[in-house]
Amino acid sequence: MKQFFISFFATIAGIWASALLGFFVLILVIGFSIANMSIGENVPVKVEKHSVLYMDLGCTVTERKTTPNILDDFYGNNTATMGLNDMVKAIRESASDDRVEGIYLDCNGVYAGAATLKSIHDELKEFKKSGKWIIAYGDSYSQSDYYLSSLADSVYLNPVGAVDIHGMAGMIMFYKDLLDNVGVDMEVYKVGTYKSAVEPFILSDISEANREQVTAYISAVWHEISADIAVNRSLTEEKINQLTDSIVSTYDQKRLVGEKLVDRLCYRHEVEDVLAKLTGKDTPDDVNFVPVEDYVATINDHNSSKNPTIAVLYAEGDTVDTASRGVGSTQIAGDEFAPQILDLAEDEDIDGLVLRVNSGGGSAFASEQIWEALEVFKASGKPFVVSMGDYAASGGYYISTGADEIYAEPTTITGSIGIFGLKPTVSKAMKKIGVNVATVSTSQNSIIMNIMQPSTPQQAKAIQESVNRGYETFVGRCSTGRKMPVDSIKAIAEGRVWDAVTAKKIGLVDKLGSLDDAIKAVAKKLNCSDDKYNVVEYPDQKFEWWEQLMNMSSQYHASILQKELGESYKYYLAIRRFNNIETLQCRMLPVEIK
């Protein structure tokens, strides 16, 4: 154990030394990075007749494209991201653009949530009504790739490629045995039989209640996806499920054609020849492929000052009290988000609001502040509608519940109305390495949430009572917002997570639909007709190089840590977030869906 700590602290010292030296080097190259980024932003794009909208699915799809990171750009570590808003906009606009012949889906392992994929899928389905074609090609198809490609007019596969359709499964990691081994006790305070976010710290395996709810919602989500694939490929849902059970990814490629999963086996250059013929070009080099982001840059929104303006406010990521930099994840920071909503309420140019929620929750305090700000917005008399993305659970549902209407994709995960608190105690771990802690205080409860000592029975009771009050507040917000009796909310609460189809049946969601449906609902409330309204997205994503420069120290430190820790970096981030976590949490258990 002693040798471990010597090595550990030596590694940390080395990391900081590298960070200090590297920072000075970084200052020399930052101007070069900014210049490169600026040059790339101003390249004109020409959409000619017989163009093809090129959708590279080798990316992570987020609600909006993430702001560029100078350090990642310099090191070449930027993960390709694409905004769902850009993808939907490009597909929709190209359907009526006589310069665009069709869409080419280049399948390279898209990473996106189920509701995000459903949004893209349904937009592609609508595109086909224009009479234009969709061509898909993959060296191999991931399940997400195939879901989108299944509605293509032709699905092409490399002759030695594979198609992966395996259904859905949820994976949860449990840490209790590890915590026991290192001498960490975890105090848990919660309300809700199904509030499973605490389970990984107090159990070694999944509880029956959690197994029940996870099975229910992933089965419902898979039903939506498998049914779409079946319709797209003129198969039955039963046949799709038979295929998932037979390990399709190991099939001989000719069998994939025989099973009607793909239409033809060919190499990439052969597909490009097909695209050349479809666009009336002599060679593939003559085809004008227009990437989604480039195409979106050419679209004129035709906003008019005479038309009502609808704000679309994106709430994506963990809900936290205060924004932190360099943590490697998107956040909904209460101290920034609530003021933004209040500004929109007072803005005379904003006539309505769509809150786009994609969050599994987080801080109960931040959720309450955002909820209250939205109540102020409603009091202004402006319509307010929620559109749910992949997740709108726990704190994500908290901030949604007061909306005039709630829209969700059929594959959205929502609910999880519950609250919990966690307190790790490391006194046993400290004793193992010979560290003892003495406390001197003026009263018996001067120190409560201190990880160095366990809570007394009096303190534990007080903390649980605080959690109970938080739960009653949460339930009360839902009761008021959904216009349902408290008892009715409690009957479907208990921290239980629901799929959106079921959530609609029990009253947690009003309608199944997309972000565009939610926008149209606000437009209808404003008596707008024939798309005579403006849409403006918030928060502002304008890139300012000086903001990046101000955050450079934390970004560079994170960069060094990531290089040193490798795969362990994600655990470092989890520990860091946990160490800074707010006391009371409205958060669903993150389930990695494979």
Image (spheres, rainbow, N blue to C red):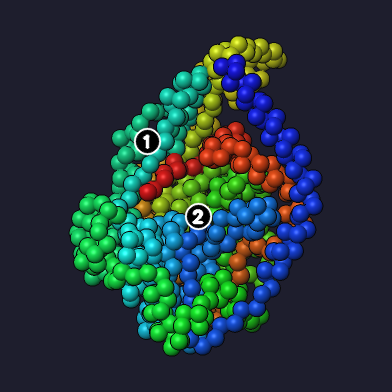
Q: Secondary structure at mark 2?
A: strand
Residue beneath disc 2: 358
* Residue 205 seen in this snapshot: yes
Depth check, front residue: 495 or 587 = 587
Q: Label 2 is placed on what type of residue?
A: Asn
**Residue under the point 42% across and 36% down:** 173
Spatial distance from mark 1 to mark 2, Cα to Cα?
24 Å
Quadrant (top left, top right, bottom left, bottom right) of the N terminus: top right
Q: Position of residue 274 (x, y in %)?
A: 38, 79
**Residue under the point 56% across and 20% down:** 426
How many residues crowd around disc 1 within 10 Å: few (fewer than 14), some, or many (20 or more)?
some
How many residues crowd around disc 2 within 10 Å: few (fewer than 14), some, or many (20 or more)?
many
Q: Is residue 141 left or right of residue 563?
A: left
* Residue 509 seen in this snapshot: no
Q: Is residue 17 left or right of residue 139?
A: right
Residue beneath disc 1: 193
Q: Position of residue 158 (x, y in %)?
A: 35, 65
Relative to residue 57, is residue 582 depicted above or below?
above
Relative to residue 284, is residue 168 depicted above or below?
above
**Residue under the point 74% across and 43% down:** 22
Relative to residue 431, is residue 158 depicted above or below?
below
Q: Position of residue 8 (x, y in %)?
A: 62, 26
Q: Earlier in the sequence, mark 1 or mark 2?
A: 1
Relative to residue 136, is residue 165 depicted above or below?
above
Depth check, front residue: 121 or 246 = 246
Q: Secondary structure at mark 1?
A: loop
